[in-house]
Amino acid sequence: MKKINCKAKEKLIIALDYNNFEEAKKLVESLGENISIYKVGLEIFLNTEGKIVDYLHSKKKKVFLDLKFHDITNTVKTACEYAIKKNVFMFNIHCSSGMSTMKEISELLKKYNSASILIGVTILTNLSENDIQEMFGGKIKLEELVLNMASLAKKSGMNGIVCSPKEARTVKEKLGKDFVTVCPGVRPEFTLNCKDDQNRIMTPYEAVKNGADFLVVGRPVTKNENPENVVKIILEEISECI
């Protein structure tokens, strides 16, 4: 049995990819002390009317509120006030909202003296370079686009970004080791052949080695018959890299 480093648990975020409270609660209870951070996305947030956040806090868990706020500045600001007042561990807005909005939200955290980590969503991990070129109508390099968005986020006072693990190393090299990288698209090796909508993926070991501060893992855990075992394998991989 491989030893699990306690720091590995601080890097792993489990996405509660469910449409009902009971399944989410069952997973949280089954994983117990092995997981301290959970991602609350649109699916579980809307289907529980936000109550999942209060439940996780009652269990002394940290919440990554992954609602990806993206609208005009005033609307995003109002949404972010909700996240701040809920004392979530981390929340995000889209970098494509622009520097003006990102600066406003950075200042909002200072106003409330909030400890929440504010991160910007760059390019979703289900998108490939072909998708980006199709959307923008030109020979755009995906990594360069991610880095540009990340640079704007840092200039705006944001704490970090969401990116795929493939871009994490470049972001760290250009923007510094303290600029936070939150990386979905992480898959244990034995699940890499499973078909889903993720394009830019790495194993947990590869992701940490490539500069990911936080690894976000959802379906490989939530859709597995033995989620506890999958989490153990992931934590062992992270520990090996640490």
Image (cartoon, rainbow, N blue to C red):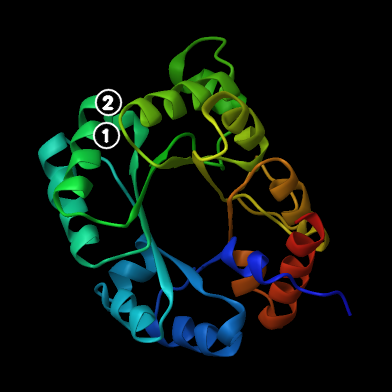
Image coordinates of residue 24 in percent, x first then y, are 46, 81
Write the residue at 57% across / 24% down.
174
Residue 47 seen in this snapshot: yes
Image coordinates of residue 47 in percent, x first then y, are 31, 73
Residue 16 seen in this snapshot: no
10 Å neighbourhood of mark 2: few (<14), some, or many (≥20)?
some
Q: Is residue 50 above or below residue 101?
A: below
In-image side of 137 versus 172 (left or right): left
Question: Farthest residue in the top direction?
Answer: 138
Under mark 2, the amino acid is Met
**Label 2, label 1: how many angstroms apart (C-alpha)?**
5 Å
Circle 2 — which element? Answer: helix
Dividing the picture into quadrants, the one containing residue 88 is bottom left
Residue labelled with disc 1: 102
Write the residue at 67% across / 65% down.
8
Q: Using the image as rendered, state which of residue 42 and residue 233 is in the foreground.
A: 233
Q: In this view, does 60 lie above or below 122?
A: below
Write the residue at 39% across / 67% down.
63
Q: Is residue 97 above or below residue 42?
A: above
Q: Do the residues labelled 2 and 1 touch (CB within 8 Å)?
A: yes
In-image side of 6 versus 29 (left or right): right
Marks counted in the figure total 2
Image coordinates of residue 147 in percent, x first then y, are 52, 24
Q: Using the image as rendered, state which of residue 215 and residue 187 is in the foreground.
A: 215
Circle 1 — which element? Answer: helix
Dividing the picture into quadrants, the one containing residue 55 is bottom left
Residue labelled with disc 2: 99
Write the residue at 15% across / 45% down.
77
Which of the image's four quarters has the C terminus?
bottom right
Question: Farthest residue in the right direction?
Answer: 1
Under mark 1, the amino acid is Met
